[in-house]
Image (cartoon, rainbow, N blue to C red):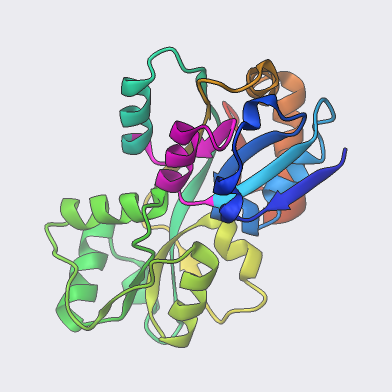
Amino acid sequence: MKRALVVVALVALTGCGSSPTLVVGAGTTIVDSGFADALADRYEAVDIAVVGGSSRELLSLLEAGAIDLAITHHPEAESEYLADHPEAVSAVVFSSSFVFAGDPSVADEVLRSLSVDALLAEVADHGVTFVSRSDGSGTAAVEQRLWSDAAVTPEGEWYVETGQGMGFTLQITDQRDGITLTELGAIIAVADRLDLVYWSPETLANPYRATVGDDAPAKAVELVDWLISTDGRSAITEASSLTIGGAVDAQGDG
């Protein structure tokens, strides 16, 4: 199947619903890692153009009718969208997990043995550089929830906000000898290029939801149906194994 990779500037497109190409928005991690490419290549029913962006950006594009379907991982933003569009076709289609990643010089065995709350308190108390996406992504939302749960306010020179995607944020983490929160697939995808270790003090689930736009063609609904079908689940597993070491699980697999 022929597919195209489209930058976020595709927001300029109008009338995607009548286009023979299905326009799908997906989180930057699953686009940058190659997972979205590999998964799209396994779906032959329609040509797909992929827009990479943060979850909030993608839901805004869906609201504007600039994309047909959004694959996001921001439960709060998704709930807001679905409250405004109660008839929208939407389903959790796969999931991954979050981990911490950091420079080995600061992420020693003691730090990696701490609970999430204790880890974040230790980072703040000692001014360990923490690099945040701060970009409206699902990852940024989970990070903020973890700070809140730990009763720690992330502020000061040690707290670095990139406002960018996961790949760039991991590069800054490496350059600044810091720590960050990342999806497992994102760090696996760059593990051979960056000097970072990664670990998870506890299970931090990361479900991805596919939501169809109001004016999207029927083929968008068919794609969602395929993603949760037996064939779709097999394709997700294959694409995940091929690109990110099996870090993404088909719905019900993990």
Look at the image and say whether residue 68 sits in the magenta stretch: yes
Q: Which residue is nearer to you in this view: 67 or 35?
A: 67
Query: Which residue is more in the foreground, 90 or 218?
Result: 218
Q: Position of residue 194 (x, y in %)?
A: 59, 79
Residue found at the far right of this picture: 1
Q: Is residue 241 visible?
A: no
Residue found at x 18% / y 74%: 124
**Occupied quadrant, residue 113:** bottom left
Q: How many marks?
A: 0
Between residue 200 and residue 101, name the one nearer to us. Answer: 101
Q: Is residue 70 left or right of residue 193?
A: left
Q: Is residue 223 visible?
A: yes
Question: Residue at (88%, 38%) from the top-left corner?
Answer: 1
- Residue at image coords 18%, 51%: 149
- Between 84 and 159, the one lying in front of the other is 84
Residue 85 at what x, y percent from top left?
Answer: 38, 19
Q: Is residue 48 magenta?
A: no
Q: Residue furthest top?
A: 87
Give the answer, above or below, for where 39 lies relative to 217.
below
Q: Which residues are magenta?
A: 53-75
Q: Position of residue 248 (x, y in %)?
A: 61, 44
67 horizontally vs 101: left or right: right
- Name the image quarter holding residue 135: bottom left
Q: Residue at x 77, y 23 (%)?
A: 231
